[in-house]
Image (cartoon, rainbow, N blue to C red):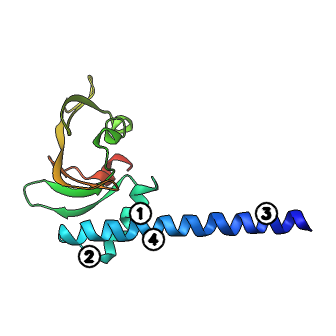
């Protein structure tokens, strides 16, 4: 019986610490999101990105084929994510990634993932070109 009580106390302690961390990340993320023009509706999506449950999500698509997305704070996270779609990262300039279809693809295509100045420890805001969205990598 004493072992069960100790396990229960340990579980409750872990749960409290975990919920506290989620609360901290949520409030800090909200502060940055608000500064960048986004609202509370983005917090669950940012938490999914932070805990690696999501690669990111598109927040705006432009008519010229560009899309703005919120994703992982580390841009190098996206270097390998496009391999299943036959794209490879061919160049990197700072936080910007340049992709091309792999050799032998029927129709060569290129696109770029550019880091914006809007970021924090928990997420980054990126711009993609050529009609791509972050969701396309997993489709």
Disc 4 to disc 1, how far (Cα)?
10 Å
Name the front one of labels 2 and 4.
4
* 10 Å crowding of disc 1: few (<14), some (14-19), many (20+): some
Instruction: Please give the residue where the numbered disc 3 appears in the rendered image.
Output: 7
User: Which percent across, then down, holds residue 119?
Assistant: 23, 55
Tag of residue 39: 2
Label 2 neighbour load within 10 Å: few <14, some 14-19, many 20+: few
| N-terminal label among 1 and 3 | 3
Task: Residue 94: give x, y in percent of width and height.
Answer: 18, 35
95 relative position to 53: left or right: left
Q: Position of residue 13 (x, y in %)?
A: 66, 66
Gap in angstroms between the C-alphas marked 1 and 3? 28 Å
Please determine whether, in this image, residue 45 is positioned above or below residue 89: below
Name the foreground residue: 85 vs 117.
117
Q: Are marks 2 and 3 in contact (CB under 8 Å)?
A: no
Q: Nearer the viewer, residue 105 or 17?
A: 17
Measured as percent of width and height from the top left, residue 81 is found at 36, 40
Q: Earlier in the sequence, mark 2 or mark 3?
A: 3
How many residues crowd around disc 3 within 10 Å: few (fewer than 14), some, or many (20 or more)?
Answer: few
**Residue 111, above or below 55:** above
Q: Are marks 4 and 1 in contact (CB under 8 Å)?
A: no
């Amino acid at each position: 019986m004493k072992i069960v009580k100790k396990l229960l106390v340990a579980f409750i302690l872990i749960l409290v610490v975990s919920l506290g961390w989620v609360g901290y990340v949520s409030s800090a993320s909200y502060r940055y999101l608000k500064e960048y023009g986004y609202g509370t509706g983005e917090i669950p999506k940012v938490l999914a990105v932070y805990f690696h449950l999501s690669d990111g999500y598109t927040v705006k698509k432009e008519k010229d084929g560009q899309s703005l997305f919120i994703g992982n704070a580390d841009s190098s996270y996206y270097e390998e994510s496009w391999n299943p779609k036959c794209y490879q990262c061919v160049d990197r300039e700072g936080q910007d990634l340049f992709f091309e279809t792999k050799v032998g693809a029927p129709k060569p295509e290129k696109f770029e993932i550019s880091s914006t100045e809007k970021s924090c420890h928990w997420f980054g805001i990126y711009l993609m070109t050529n009609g791509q969205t972050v969701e396309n990598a997993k489709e």
